[in-house]
Image: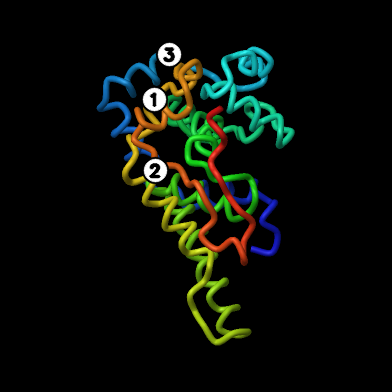
Amino acid sequence: MQDPEQTELVFAITQAMAGKQPRRLLRRIRATPAGERLLREQPIFDDKTVDLDQLAALPEGSFGHEFARWMRHHGFTPGLMERESTASDPDLAYLGKRLMQVHDFWHVLTGYNRDPIGELGVLAFSFAQSGSYGIGLILGMVVWQSSRELWRTEHRLWSPVIPYIWRGYRIGRRAQRLPPLILEELFPLPLDSVRALLQIQPLRRSFTPEALAPIAAPSAG
């Protein structure tokens, strides 16, 4: 809460509060043809298997091109978010690694940027997609602390971060379930077409531009 840049603590919290939720998610993934394929092939998305130069060479406006541009803009490399799982089940360990590897996909698909508010939006999207207890706790803490500070300083409780979080959650609830999908296979397609295919309505504008930094979906060309 004191330093939003310490994103590694998000993983510490989600692992500490995982409970049976990861196994429930794994069962849901195994129950789908796409999920069976994902767990059978177990594709890896990191700096050893992905060439951002090749993705950047894809047509402008494609998912892969926009992803490469987003990663370079922020100085990221594929697999940067990856952490080793302590799960004894190899499929469960892979799933935990996979969800961290594709975190930046969700930024590009939803239109939430890399700023702290954008990270909250993607966390809300992730919560809707995975049901992680730890992510739910983090979002609740943010809303509580933000509202408390507003009450202390302005005697109002409605925090401007709430619409961003709620919007991210709604995007996640209405979208297809992404964890079972091999999303990198969609890189050659236009970004807007991928969003339509996955039923993702990206964030296009800031709710409160006077109070928060604008957040907009990456341009599709």
Q: CA distance from mark 3 to mark 2?
A: 21 Å
| Residue nearer the viewer, 74 or 82 | 74
Residue at 53% from the left image edge and 63% from the top image edge: 161
Residue at 69% from the left image edge and 51% from the top image edge: 6
Q: Amino acid at mark 2?
A: Ser
Q: Residue furthest right?
A: 75
Q: Amino acid at mark 1?
A: Leu
Q: Nearer the viewer, mark 1 or mark 3?
A: 1
Q: Earlier in the sequence, mark 1 or mark 2?
A: 2
Mark 3 neighbour class, 10 Å CA radius: few under 14, some 14 to 19, many 20 or more: few
Q: Amino acid at mark 3?
A: Glu
Q: CA distance from mark 1 to mark 3?
A: 12 Å
| Label 2 secondary element | helix
State the residue position of label 1: 181
| Residue nearer the viewer, 63 or 51 | 63
In the rendered image, which quarter contains the C terminus? Answer: top right
| Vertical arrangement, residue 54 with respect to residue 112, above or below | above
- Are the residues at dot 3 and dot 2 in contact (C-beta closer than 8 Å)? no
Q: Nearer the viewer, mark 1 or mark 2?
A: 1
Q: Earlier in the sequence, mark 1 or mark 3?
A: 3
Residue 80, x across and y down, in percent: 66, 32
Q: CA distance from mark 1 to mark 2?
A: 13 Å
Where on the picture, by quarter, is residue 208? bottom right
Q: Which mark is residue 42?
A: none
State the residue position of label 2: 130
Residue 214, x across and y down, in percent: 61, 53
Residue at 59% from the left image edge and 85% from the top image edge: 154
State the residue position of label 3: 41
| Label 3 secondary element | helix
